[in-house]
Each structure stands twice: as C-alpha cells, then as structure tokens.
Image: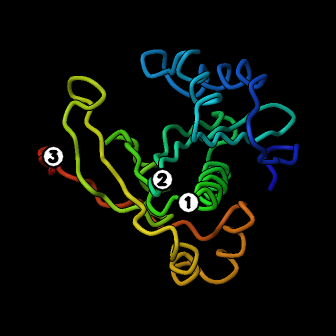
Amino acid sequence: MTGGAAAVSITPARRDDLPAVLALERVGFPEPEQWSERSWAGELLGEGRTVLLARAGQVVGVVAFRTTGEHADLHRLVVAPGHRREGLGTALVLAGLDAVRHLGARAVLLEVDYDNEPAIALYQHLGFEQLTARRDYYGPGQDALILKLYDLDTWPARYAAQLGEEAAERAQQGSRPAPVVPPPPAVPADTEEQP
C-alpha cells in the first residue's frame, strides 16, 4: 500500500508511540472531539487492547479495539488528513478485525457520529450493520449510530462473496480492498434508541 510517496506499513503500537498518536489525534479531530493523553495511554496499555498504527515514515493512522471474550469494540480510528481517501482507514480496520478475530472476538460494535458519512460508508462497506441510534451521544444535537459486525467467524467468506476473492485475500493480509460501495442512505434523526 502506498500513501503519498512513502510505502505504508501497519504494525502494533508500542508504549513509546504515545506522542505520535497524540500528534495524529490533534490533526485528525477538532479539539472538542480529541481524546486525551490519558485515554490514549489506556488504549496502549490496557488489557484486551489492540492498537495498530499505519506508518509512512511517520504515524499517519491508528485504530484501537478492545476485546472482551467474544466481543470487541472498535474504539477509535484516526487517519491523517493528507492520507484520507487512500484506503488507509479500510486497511487499518481490516487488520484490526483480523487481530481481534484471532483473539476470540466473534462480533464487533462501534459508535460513529451520525453526520460522519465517509466513516459510515467505510464501516458498512466492511459488513457492519446499523443496530440502533443514540440521540445526543456526543453531546446536545450530536447523535451516534451504533453499528455491529455480527459474525467474525464467517466475515472473511461474506466479505469475499460481496467483493470477490481478491478482496478477501487482501482483507486477510490487511491491505486495501476494492471496490468502494456508495454511502448508505441517511438515517432519520428521530430514530429512537432500541434496547
């Protein structure tokens, strides 16, 4: 995979990567949405955590999962603005899904801002389905969609059926799949939370 002029590699994060992750967080999200140093330290050092970095000379992407038994949560995905729309987010999520599957996870949940259409399209492209919506999840007027990938045991096969064998092979290797499906239809803001 290439991003700009440098080749991109995806590797597990280490404790000493915290400053680079924080720098990426600062350029990846507006200040009110940024995670703190303490939050990222918890991801890097916490039990059951899988944090992967994309490097192209420097850290240009990060994905963080937490696995508890057969369930995993995708906590955070950040891609440097200059490396977006290159398949890097997809590659990070694919590598993370493969890692948590090998740790025993069978299903994955995530929350995504209702207005973040590129992220929603990416997750749905990878097989995540909308479970529910939560009003004001991120604050007043900032709703979230809760998405779930239901069965990681069959996910590689379903992914292959949807996108072709070559894409599934790439998914297993953690590299960019193709093609990209169009964004999902918008979910009405008045969608009620379901138990």
Asked whether, in this view, residue 46 is left or right of residue 17, the answer is left
The numbered mark, 2 or 3, whose residue comes first in the sequence reads: 2
Vertical arrangement, residue 147 with respect to residue 142, above or below? below
Asked whether, in this view, residue 115 is left or right of residue 11, the answer is left
Q: Given the image, on which type of amino acid does mark 3 rest? A: Glu
Q: Do the residues bearing badges 2 and 1 touch, measured as CB atoms within 8 Å?
A: yes
Q: Residue at x 11, y 45 (%)?
A: 190
Asked whether, in this view, residue 97 is left or right of residue 83, the answer is left
Number of numbered markers: 3
Vertical arrangement, residue 88 with respect to residue 63, above or below? below
Residue designated by label 3: 193
Residue designated by label 2: 69
The numbered mark, 1 or 3, whose residue comes first in the sequence reads: 1
Q: Residue at x 44, y 69 (%)?
A: 151
Indicate the colouring scheme. Answer: rainbow
Asked whether, in this view, residue 122 is left or right of residue 21, the answer is left
Disc 2 and disc 1: Cα gap in Å? 6 Å
Q: Residue at x 23, y 47 (%)?
A: 133
Query: Hey, which quadrant is residue 98 in on the image?
Result: bottom right
Residue 195: x and y, percent?
A: 15, 50
The numbered mark, 2 or 1, whose residue comes first in the sequence reads: 2
- Element under disc 1: loop
Residue 62: x and y, percent?
A: 65, 38
Residue designated by label 1: 104
